[in-house]
Amino acid sequence: MKKYTDTGKKDTRSGFGDGLTELGRTNPNVVALCADLVGSLKMQDFIDENPERFFQVGIAEANMMGIAAGLTIGGKIPFTGTFANFSTGRVYDQIRQSIAYSDKNVKICASHAGLTLGEDGATHQILEDIGLMKMLPGMTVINTCDYNQTKAATIAIAEHHGPVYLRFGRPKVANFTPEDQKFEIGKAVMLNEGKDVTIIATGHLVWEALQAAEQLEEQGVSAEVINIHTIKPLDEAAILASVGKTGCVVTAEEHNFLGGLGESVARTLVQNHPAPQEFVATMDTFGESGTPEQLMQKYGLNAAAIVKAAQKVMKRK
Amino acid sequence: MPNTQQLEDFITQVRRDIVRQVHKVNSGHPGGSLGCAEFISVLYQEVMDRKEGFDMDGKGEDLFFLSNGHISPVFYSVLARSGYFPVEELNTFRLIDSRLQGHPTTHEGLPGVRVASGSLGQGMSVAIGAANSKKLNGDKHLVYSLHGDGELQEGQNWEAIMYAAANKVDNLISTVDRNYQQIDGCTDDVLPMGDLKVKFEAFGWDVLEIENGNDIQQVVDGLKEAKSRTGKGKPVCILLNTEMGHGVDFMMGSHKWHGVAPNDEQLETALAQNPETLGDY
Ligand SMILES: Cc1ncc(C[n+]2csc(CCOP(=O)(O)OP(=O)(O)O)c2C)c(N)n1
Ligand SMILES: [Mg+2]
């Protein structure tokens, strides 16, 4: 199996912050907005270098989305920053009408997604945001897996015209994708080729999928691991090619199984090539307080859960 | 009714509980919690008419809603020490499988909590609904709510403020924790809110100010005054001037302690400044 090494734990939100700083230097049209969470979103460097291109809106996310929509009129490329919950559910209609329906070039950048936000608990741990965002016509939905990928994605979405939802997280996690890997919106990344089972993962679950594949290899199972960072538009060709070969799939995400990556994969398979699928995801539940590791264990979102799901799905072939 | 010394002891113990809770899990929000220790303690110990035990409907008693849910440490301490659940349970703050979630919720069934809060700006609307419900039930009791000042930047508050005045929700006392701090800095640097008294009055509220919300007597007097102004056709607003981090000298007056836990050494200092009164959990 292909070896991946963690080059040192880093948070994905720092990837966003550093990507934004780079954009500040290279693209004069990039502007940033924040709703009283500058530190959490790692936006301070951008602000220091480009104070006139930063808009602090206070604790007023709905207003932030509207201002971002307006900033695009005149050619600015606004990046909004707040927690995933307040980037989506809080402001759904503002995004729907002023951004998505109006086809505005706003980049909605959302940190602290999912359970790994930890101790703040369920009020802040949104597990429904991928679903909310992917249902909006014209919205691009991206969930990155490590620091390098988040930084590359942040830079790449500035070049893409149209609304984008970029989802990342709070904790320090393995950084393992190549620093110079180009981020191609809508293009799956093949991490490991295999023949017995396909594991399709997004976000923090990608590293877990690689750990799972290693454990499966020890059991004599050859697992193909694909990183889907763009949930919409979905790389259906990559998914169909892989599942056509392995005959079964496990999807893994830090999100509700209703409305997430898994459902998008299932829909693709049903329409083209029905195959057994197991979901590693939260099962229609809210989260709770706890450390990220404890929560991922309790809600079944780790390598062990992926291994179990792979064993189960292979029996269903 | 407790006397002044008893109230003082209660509040000192609440301060200990706050810093001990957040220190243990190295997370949570001590700043706003410490600043509101007098207010929430006086409310539960001295002002609110409360029944024994807890039921969700709260008929025949006063109700309190914490809209700025991040100051859960002070809320949990006051609830526990007012008899809603065992004080030892403060040990489980923010731990997995606990009823004491990072932000207060009904989901785990913690007695004393009637709606989840944490996502800011939603509590006043809920308090208005509960106040309307009391009126429909012919229940003369009052509804109290507490809000951060930064929290008032959320537009939903102003929808609620407009609604409450227009609909003469005069059994509601909404208090603003005016500490002039939020996460990214002073409220005046992040997004100045101007003269809140003038704004609330312009929306049709009866507004009173407590000059020093960390002075027990002023809080007692202010809350009693607010109570006397209910039932007169206007919702009542208290502007409660507090100091973020009050009672722990190195935390006082700075937004830096909004959501940061003290380390071991800082905990010792904080506890030394607030000697044990009612017994630690
Ligand atoms: C809708 C929403 N947006 C953002 C946050 C993140 N947040 C938590 S507390 C806080 C600052 C609140 O300021 P204030 O109400 O003045 O409380 P204080 O810091 O004084 O305790 C922010 C922005 C949140 N909890 N909810
Ligand atoms: Mg404040």
Image: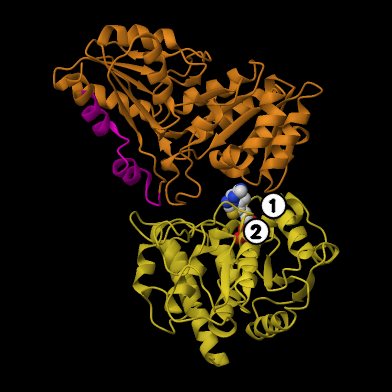
Chain colours: A orange, B yellow
Is B32 one of the magenta-colored residues?
no
As drawn, the label of residue B125 is 2
**Residue A44 or A140: which is nearer the viewer?**
A140
Q: Dividing the image into 4 quarters, which one contains the N terminus of chain A?
A: top left
**In front: mark 2 or mark 1?**
2
Using a 10 Å C-alpha cutoff, classify the residue at mark 1 as few (fewer than 14 neighbours), some (14 to 19) or many (20 or more): some
Is B138 located above or below residue B180 in the figure?
below
Q: Which residue is mark 1?
A: B156
The kind of secondary structure the magenta stretch mainly shows is helix
Whether residue A171 sits left or right of residue A222 in the image: it is: right
Badge 2 vs badge 1, beta-carbon distance below 8 Å = yes
Q: Chain of mark 2?
A: B
User: Residue A32's spot in the image, x, y percent?
Assistant: 69, 33
- In the rendered image, residue A153, in percent from the top left (x then y), is placed at 54, 21
Q: Is mark 2 within 8 Å of ligand 1?
A: no
Report helix, strand or loop for mark 1: helix
**Labels 2 and 1 in the same subunit:** yes
Q: Which residues are magenta?
A: A288-310
* Residue type (three-letter) at the residue carrying disc 2: Ser
Dot 1 falls on which chain?
B
